Amino acid sequence: MNEQEKSIIVKRINNTLDRIRPYLEADGGNISLTEVTDDLMVRVKLHGACEGCPFSYQTLKSGVEQALLREVPEIKGLEAVD
């Protein structure tokens, strides 16, 4: 994948995160994209209340990852980083 293709994917990921963000903010949290690896794994960082929330894994997998896979099917998955 060339840089232009990756840039388009990153933009689509950020657009999807922008649509999800208000739901996280309503609970005092937030999310930011930290990296898209060469093998198209998406790495994000949780902020605020989401950082220590016992439901953060479920939110990531059932909410954020599913939304990203629907909108950007090229990605392989999602993982959180500290």
Image (cartoon, grey):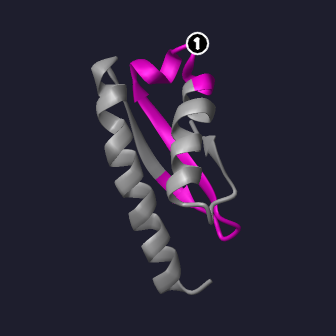
Q: Residue at x 53, y 58 (%)?
A: 35
* In the image: residue 60, left or right of residue 76: left
Figure quadrant of residue 41: bottom right
Q: Which residue is drawn at 46% across and 85% down?
A: 4
* In the image: residue 58, left or right of residue 9: right
Residue 43 at x, y = what percent?
57, 50
Q: List the single residue furthest toward the front.
A: 70
Quadrant of image for the N terminus: bottom right
Quadrant of image for the C terminus: top right
Give the amino acid at mark 1.
Pro
* In the image: residue 20, left or right of residue 45: left
- In terms of secondary structure, where does tag 1 sit? loop
Figure quadrant of residue 80: top right
Graded by Cα atoms within 10 Å as few (under 14), some (14 to 19) or many (20 or more), the crowding at tag 1 reads few
Q: Is residue 43 located in the magenta-colored stretch of the structure?
A: yes
Q: Give the range drawn in magenta.
A: 34-58
Query: Is 23 located above or below residue 45 in the figure?
Result: above
Q: Residue at x 49, y 39 (%)?
A: 45
Q: Is residue 26 located in the magenta-colored stretch of the structure?
A: no
* In the image: residue 67, left or right of residue 41: left
Query: Is 16 located above or below residue 12 in the figure?
Result: above
Residue 47 at x, y = what percent?
41, 30
Residue 56 at x, y = what percent?
55, 23
Figure quadrant of residue 42: bottom right
Q: Residue at x 37, y 27 (%)?
A: 24
Q: Mark 1 points at which residue?
A: 54
